[in-house]
Image (cartoon, helix red, strand yellow):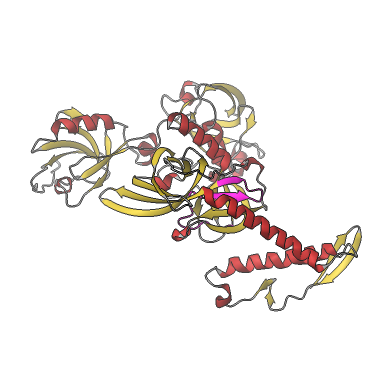
Amino acid sequence: METTFQINGKTRHAEINFNGLSHGVPRFSRDAVGVTKRGIMLKKIFILLVGSFLLFSFSLSSAKSKPAEVLKLFDDLQQVIISISKTIQPAVVHIEVVHKINDLKYKSLASGLVIDDKGYVLTNEHVVDKAISVVVTLASKLEYPAQVIGTDKQTDLALLKIEPREKLQVAKMGNSDLVEVGEWVIAVGNPYGFDRTVSFGIVSGKGRVLPNLPVETPLINDFIQTDAAIDPGSSGGPLVNLKGEVIGINSIGFGRAQGFTIPINMAKEVTGKLLVSGRINRGWLGVVIQPLNRDYASYYNSPDLQGVIISDILPNSPAAKAELLPGDVILEYNHQKVSAEKQEDLNRFSLMISQTPLGQVIPLKILRDHQVKEITVNIGEQPKVDAEEYESGLGFTVKEITENIFRQKMLDDKEGVLVSFVDVAGPASQAELDEGDIIKKVDDFYIKTLADFKKALGEVKQKKQIMVVIKRGKTQRFILILPETKAEKTEPTTQ
């Protein structure tokens, strides 16, 4: 293959002979690739070949250049990677978690990052979700029990605390706003339990949104995408640039070459709030939105129209108080233009709202009835999104009804508690309580909140018979739970 290029203003020609190449990609047997998947290895080898050619071509611009000088460039890069790996590895920890989900216990392995010499460790929320014990192992191989200081489901971040008996190596933080697509990065973690494994790649993309994850609480991160390996067990480890700065906390991997990392600037913000209060306060507008694509723009007789459509207004929300209406199109938020062509684009607008300080009065520019209007809204606090669960001790678990659950389950109201699990061998199952039932009453106690349920259960738990009134779909039903004996199954009759 002949290639033409410019060096110091002169046109040069060179020929590269790729023996065994098909469409520019080398052919290798599976044995040559080893455990690394063929496609990724071929891509990286091809990049190295092209890089070697370009570096060698650059050396031709000087008569004094030697091939050894070109090889030295690669050796220098290799030494940088080795140096960064040695620096960051002691700050990466191994995390072992025992989870309890309903009546099942299981163990998982993950990674974390030391961010403070007092013993604070950053990892993912999904790593410690429903944890009953968390153990952190340092590079010294010493193990420490860890306390969960706080978690944030919407960014998949968690802050842990250990009480170390040794001096901790602390990671150097970078600025994820300065990350560029194409820059080289290193991912460090404990994939499949292999401690402090290092992988090398590039930043493949920025601002990635993952809208279709099977999670109850949608993530609001603008993820950094990388082809550095993020495998099971790598979650919570760092993504590091070639300056040795952490630019992200690794979160999710979809096979090879598709890893997604939480920007470190987001992690810094969340960590700061968790240290202060143990929880996250986010701005809230109280609107349900949808994208405004070109078809909708055409409907509004404005092909170039950009914005987001308000499809619904939540009761008693800041949007309702500001008299925003379904059908309004938000054009600007706090003097910043808003646009969303696809569902995943809505994340940018959601981030803008969530990062607005509580109580701040924000100007909105909207389109209503083909006229542009300006409205101000006082940003409120986002309602709780992480639903608390509670084990009844009667063979079932309940969950508080959050705004998300209310809308996802299409419930009539938010009063009561949701039955999230029923033990098939427990008294609740024998009484035919089902997952998805809404408990409205326990004996003489009306249930509006999870606190009401806990209080009622404390009053009746010693009884031999407990009458529970539930809502199943549109039908009310009575469930008689016998804590110590089996109940006979009966079917209600509609009259």
> For residue 316, what is the image quadrant?
top left
The structure residue drawn at horizontal position 60% and vertical position 45%, both measured from the top left corner, is 247
Relative vertical location of residue 1 with respect to residue 336 in this rendering, above or below: below
Magenta-colored span:
227-248
Of residues 75 and 287, the one nearer the viewer is 75
In the image, residue 93 lies at what x, y percent? 47, 50
Of residues 206 and 79, the one nearer the viewer is 79
In the image, residue 108 lies at what x, y percent? 38, 54
Relative vertical location of residue 63 with respect to residue 209 in this rendering, above or below: below
- How many marks the image carries: the answer is 0
Relative vertical location of residue 458 with respect to residue 263 in this rendering, above or below: above
Is residue 291 visible to the viewer in this orientation of the structure? no
56 sits left or right of 221 in the view:
right
> For residue 469, what is the image quadrant?
top left
Quadrant where the N terminus is found in the figure: bottom right
In the image, residue 62 lies at what x, y percent? 89, 62
> For residue 262, what is the image quadrant?
top right
Quadrant where the C terminus is found in the figure: top left
